Image (tube, helix red, strand yellow):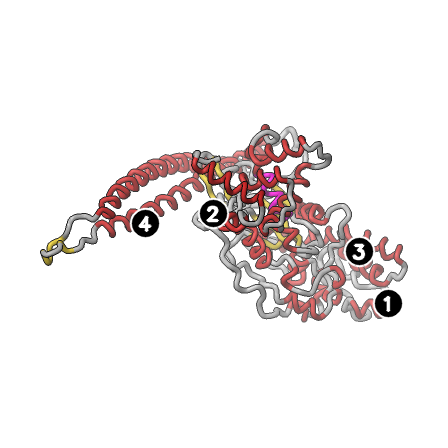
């Protein structure tokens, strides 16, 4: 399929100038074939994702922008962006031209609605080629929704070009193009969807499903090993400090050169060292058990891998899976925007702000998430079989004008223990902090609900909140109420402004507690906080909640 006619036809001279097309100019690029799309070696499946369980918080972001890059200096940007993308690219050009040219409100609305689905089709077509080195304009469509540079002001183009391009943070925060590349490389499994599965799976599908499950089991065991090894290293460090203290002898008074007996503090340190040794031995025993389980799971994984190879099952991610994942990201964008929001997918100057700190860049998202975690230290903590780990979800930054972030899934279905969840954040929200709080509240609710499973209306955080919701005879979506209350909890109650129902405040105080230093401040901000703080002290004397 050739696209040489995409820029042909009669175009208003002003529109032609706006979209950077010279009169009579035609594109000559042909749609690439399969071998052209996959001319670079695909990544080997990396198996279980590696998570650093030793990290206790986000590293402080020091740099929020970098020197501007020449993204929009290319006079052929628009042609490059659309060339090779088939008939839908022609329609994008046609509808965008008519949308920009229309003066009648109804006509403009009609061309706008026609443009939206074909634009998404073009973006999906681009995503299919994520294996290969995409031209920058195509990459920027996936990342920023930047189809046509002249739709932005000069100031906005400069701002976008200053966004830090590479992930230098080490955190799982991804722009859509980065996310698709990791899926394509097999480093991360494809997202779960609500689509109805075929009842009769063929043998290849069954093998792939077994492989996914085996990867999940191996990943869980590996997570436990890392967590326990980290705990043992901490205990060994304490032991080393105790031993160093014990081995330091003062001279006996009146007897120079003669070591004195242990001091009372040193004798106490000896007893503490003995207890540390016991804990270390117990940890060593647990680690040995986890290693044994991991080796067993890994052996099963290798066997299934051989079976898949013999059966001719392709372990690499194919292009259809990538397109499906892109469409999942599109669905995330739709949820972030909501029914009444702005679903226009193309970046335009009138739809977003010109301050880089107001948009959902990776660095801004991390800074906001760090501020929330400071007030909700248990936000990313997950306990499974008495093991508690800090697991930050994958954050996918979707190029849309949504007002809220969403939690797509709290964790992967085959690894509830140590897998990352998936959260989507809009790149161009009205208020970034609010959009992130929506997403984190959604994550909080879904993790707690999955933990309680069938008893979510009775047990845990969701159970307590649902019982309050029912007693108040409230109508509507209980999760929406929770999300709004969580936002008030973080934004208002943490500052001592009493905005919540007193029973909800009590639930959150116990089940999503502020750090101790914040509690110490709040106890002097009102009767309710003082009472909750007093209850904390009483409960701590009776061995916890």
Q: Does the stretch in magenta take in 439?
A: yes
| Alpha carbon separation for disc pair 2 and 1 | 54 Å
Q: Does the stretch in magenta take in 24?
A: no
Q: Residues within 10 Å of mark 4 (few under 14, many from 20)?
A: few
Q: Which residue is mark 1?
A: 12
Asked whether disc 1 touches disc 3, contact meaning CB atoms under 8 Å apart, the reply is no
Q: Residue at x 20, y 51 (%)?
A: 247
Task: Give the mark nearest the N terminus, 3 or 4.
Answer: 3
Q: Quadrant of the image for the N terminus?
A: bottom right
Q: Residues within 10 Å of mark 2 (few under 14, many from 20)?
A: some
| Alpha carbon separation for disc pair 2 and 3 | 43 Å
Quarter of the image for residue 148 reads: bottom right
Q: Position of residue 385 (x, y in %)?
A: 45, 34
Residue closer to the observer: 436 or 18: 436
| Alpha carbon separation for disc pair 1 and 3 | 17 Å
Q: Which residue is mark 2?
A: 50
Quarter of the image for residue 78 reads: bottom right
Residue mark closest to the camera, 1 vs 4: 4
**Region rendered in magenta:** 437-447
Residue mark closest to the camera, 2 vs 1: 2
Q: Residues within 10 Å of mark 1 (few under 14, many from 20)?
A: few
Task: Give the mark nearest the N terminus, 4 or 2.
Answer: 2
Task: Give the mark nearest the N terminus, 1 or 3.
Answer: 1
Task: Give the mark nearest the N terminus, 2 or 1.
Answer: 1
Asked whether disc 3 touches disc 4, contact meaning CB atoms under 8 Å apart, the reply is no
Per the image, label 2 sits on a secondary structure element best described as loop
**Mark sitting on residue 91:** 3
Q: Which residue is mark 4?
A: 237
Residue mark closest to the camera, 2 vs 3: 2
Q: Is residue 376 visible?
A: yes
Per the image, label 4 sits on a secondary structure element best described as helix
């Amino acid at each position: 399929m050739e696209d040489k006619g995409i820029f042909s036809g009669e175009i208003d001279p002003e529109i032609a100038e706006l979209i950077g097309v010279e009169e009579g100019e035609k594109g000559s690029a042909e749609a690439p074939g399969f071998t052209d799309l996959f001319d670079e070696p695909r990544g080997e499946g990396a198996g279980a994702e590696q998570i650093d369980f030793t990290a206790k918080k986000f590293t402080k972001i020091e740099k929020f922008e970098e020197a501007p890059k020449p993204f929009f200096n290319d006079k052929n940007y628009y042609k490059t962006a659309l060339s090779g993308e088939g008939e839908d690219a022609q329609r994008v050009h046609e509808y965008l031209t008519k949308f920009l040219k229309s003066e009648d409100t109804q006509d403009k609305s009609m061309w706008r609605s026609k443009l939206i689905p074909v634009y998404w089709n073009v973006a999906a077509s681009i995503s299919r080629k994520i294996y290969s080195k995409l031209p920058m304009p195509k990459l920027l469509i996936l990342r920023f929704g930047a189809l046509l540079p002249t739709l932005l002001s000069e100031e906005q183009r400069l701002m976008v070009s200053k966004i830090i391009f590479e992930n230098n943070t080490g955190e799982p925060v991804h722009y859509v193009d980065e996310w698709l590349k990791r899926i394509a490389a097999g480093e991360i499994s494809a997202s779960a969807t609500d689509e109805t599965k075929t009842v009769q799976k063929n043998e290849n599908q069954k093998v792939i499903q077994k492989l996914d499950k085996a990867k999940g089991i191996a990943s869980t065991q590996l997570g436990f090993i890392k967590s326990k090894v980290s705990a043992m290293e901490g205990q060994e460090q304490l032991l080393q400090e105790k031993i160093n203290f014990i081995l330091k002898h003062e001279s006996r008074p009146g007897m120079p050169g003669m070591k004195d007996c242990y001091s009372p503090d040193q004798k106490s340190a000896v007893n503490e060292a003995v207890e540390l040794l016991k804990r270390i031995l117990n940890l060593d025993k647990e680690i040995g058990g986890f290693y044994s389980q991991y080796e067993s799971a890994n052996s099963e994984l290798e066997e299934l891998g051989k079976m898949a190879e013999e059966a001719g099952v392709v372990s690499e991610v194919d292009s259809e899976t990538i397109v499906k994942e892109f469409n999942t990201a599109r669905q995330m964008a739709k949820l972030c925007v909501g029914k009444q929001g702005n679903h226009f997918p193309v970046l335009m100057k009138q739809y977003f702000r010109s301050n880089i700190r107001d948009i959902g860049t990776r660095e801004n998202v991390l800074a906001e998430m760090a501020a929330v975690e400071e007030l909700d230290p248990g936000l990313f903590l997950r306990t499974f079989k008495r093991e508690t780990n800090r697991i930050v979800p994958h954050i996918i930054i979707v190029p849309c004008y949504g007002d809220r972030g969403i939690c797509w899934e709290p964790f992967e279905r085959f690894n509830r223990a140590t897998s990352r969840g998936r959260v989507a954040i809009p790149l161009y929200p009205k208020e970034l902090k609010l959009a992130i709080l929506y997403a984190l509240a959604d994550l909080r609710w879904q993790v707690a609900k999955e933990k309680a499973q069938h008893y979510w209306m009775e047990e845990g955080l969701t159970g307590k909140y649902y019982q309050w919701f029912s007693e108040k005879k409230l109508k509507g979506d209980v999760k929406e109420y929770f999300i709004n209350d969580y936002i008030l909890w973080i934004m208002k109650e943490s500052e001592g402004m009493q905005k919540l129902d007193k029973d909800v405040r009590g639930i959150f105080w116990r089940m999503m507690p502020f750090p101790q230093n914040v509690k110490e401040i709040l106890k002097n901000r009102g009767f309710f906080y003082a009472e909750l703080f007093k209850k904390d002290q009483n409960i701590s004397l009776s061995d916890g909640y």
